Image (cartoon, coloured by chain):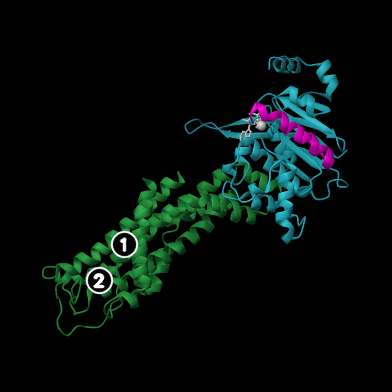
Chain colours: A green, B cyan
Amino acid sequence: MGSKRLLFGCLIIGIFSLLAIAAPLVSPYDPSSIDQAGLLMPPSARHLLGTDGLGRDLLSRIIYGARISLSIGLIAVGISVAIGLVFGAVSGFYGGLIDSLIMRFVDIMLCFPTFYLILAVTAILGPSIFNIMIIIGLTSWMGTARLIRAEILSLKEREFIQAERAIGASSSRIILRHLIPNAIGPVMVNATLGIAGAILVESGLSFLGLGVQPPTPSWGNILIESKSTLGVAWWITVFPGAAILTTILGFNFIAEGLKKKIG
Amino acid sequence: MILQVKNITKTFIVERGMFKRGAGLVRALDGVSFSMEEYSALGVVGESGSGKTTLAKIILGLIPANGGEVIFDERMIADFRKDVQIIFQNPYNSLDPKMRIINTLAEPLLIHRVIPRHALKERAIELLRMVGLDEGALSRYPIEFSGGQRQRICIARALASEPKFIVLDEPISSLDLTIQAEMLDLFLALKERFKLTYIFISHNLAVIKQMADQVIVMESGKIVEQGAKDAIFNSPAKDYTKLLLEAARGW
Ligand SMILES: Nc1ncnc2c1ncn2[C@@H]1O[C@H](COP(=O)(O)OP(=O)(O)OP(=O)(O)O)[C@@H](O)[C@H]1O
Ligand SMILES: [Mg+2]
């Protein structure tokens, strides 16, 4: 069951990733070119998913939007995992004062409702794609840190780590070559869900006008732009919504599959 | 004297559970002293919980003692982490599950620069052969091996840095009876070959009889009797030792 889900999830995410990477080759139109023939055209042979309120091809915008949304998810989570790994590993491995300090810092970070924190910082620094990635990354590493710390606390008492010490392995060698590889499994599950989460956060920011700024398409802002035409053009809401939903489902399948695999 | 252990004391603080106030103290070692000559074999016996593993870890510097000293003679033990090694009780737990055997064996070789990098693989194969395995093991993971095979790999890793002193902490107690004897033979052969000095920990006196020439008997953190093997086996002075001997006969 686990491996079937994993496969299915990978298939979904694989397809979206391929579309995103090959966007200039596979998208039928330039995502910002306007079709003079008309705006708000329903799906047809000419525009498979219809056009938006400015007469731009929706399919092309969703394909280009995949690039932005998936990169935001991936890079934000990359940053968050990197920070979480470092803090969690140092905390769990060295213990003592440094552990208390890091864990208090984690508690403080967790006190802020993450979304409002992201919102506030984005409002101050400005909503560029780069800023959004970094801000999501900087505000979402705490779970990873705690997870890694807990794993390392239990791993470091195991005999194979003691054996490493006995053969003279340095602390950094033990952390990098033995503790992290053995602790990374649950983090990967978490990270997969984190990518989905980051894509949702960007959509939420878009809703408040603080997401990726138009005309650059992201799934979030395409969806939000449909708000004003919701009554007349269902496709502008449904298709980007479906893209987000499917992707999140895909990442969840991967996460669940991984979890089963790790045991 | 290659090793002198002087008056080692170790107390563990154990939490008593969530709702009980205060912490309990476990006195795992209480004034343990002994010394060893080069090339000798010391057997340590004692029931479960008597502090044998704690003693081993303190000798290896893996956990700190609360008091006392462990002194290795620097003329024989020049590089502590290279020259003193340990084999643990549980081979299922002693190898990194995420690491191929070749990398596990390469670690001590790399860390102590025993040989040049390009000769690593060849040396790893040599080590495996020495413990009765072959090069097919190199690219496999610990999970693919039986307990006995894993313990052989642990021995190969411990010997990779060419140590002079080894602590064997119940190295066969978690293995099948059928392979225990051949493991003991392997240890004895390796001892001869590498001129090792070792401490052999066991709760099984029959094994101690075969592996040691000096014996220490431990009971709840204290040495209750110590001396030459024959003296202890033929005329035990303490009731506790007699009990252990009785129990061993029942085997
Ligand atoms: N990390 C620890 N924290 C708390 N107590 C410990 C710890 N390690 C050992 N102890 C306690 O110290 C005592 C001695 O333990 P030790 O493992 O040295 O015994 P042992 O002689 O090796 O027993 P066995 O034959 O079962 O391996 C036991 O009471 C044990 O519960
Ligand atoms: Mg023990």
What segment carries the magenta color?
A: B176-199
Magenta-span inclusion, residue B231: no
Report which quarter residue B219 is drawn in.
Answer: top right
| Image vertical order of residue B139 relative to residue A136, above or below | above
Can residue A6 be seen here? The reply is yes
Q: Residue at x 63, y 29 (%)?
A: B176
Where does residue A226 sit, x and y in percent of width and height?
19, 70
Q: Is residue A195 left or right of residue B3?
A: left
Neighbor class of circle 1 (other Cα within 10 Å; few <14, some 14-19, many 20+) is: some
Ligand 2 shown in quarter: top right
Element class at badge 1: helix
Q: Chain ID for label 2?
A: A
Neighbor class of circle 2 (other Cα within 10 Å; few <14, some 14-19, many 20+) is: many
| Image vertical order of residue B200 relative to residue B143, above or below | above
Where does residue B83 sit, x and y in percent of width and height?
79, 46
Magenta-span inclusion, residue B181: yes
Which badge, 2 or 1, comes first in the chain's sequence? 1
Q: Main secondary structure of the magenta part?
A: helix
Quadrant in which the C terminus of chain A is drawn: top left
Q: Is residue B58 left or right of residue B33?
A: left
Residue bearing the label numbered 2: A222
Quadrant in which the N terminus of chain A is drawn: top left
Element class at badge 2: helix
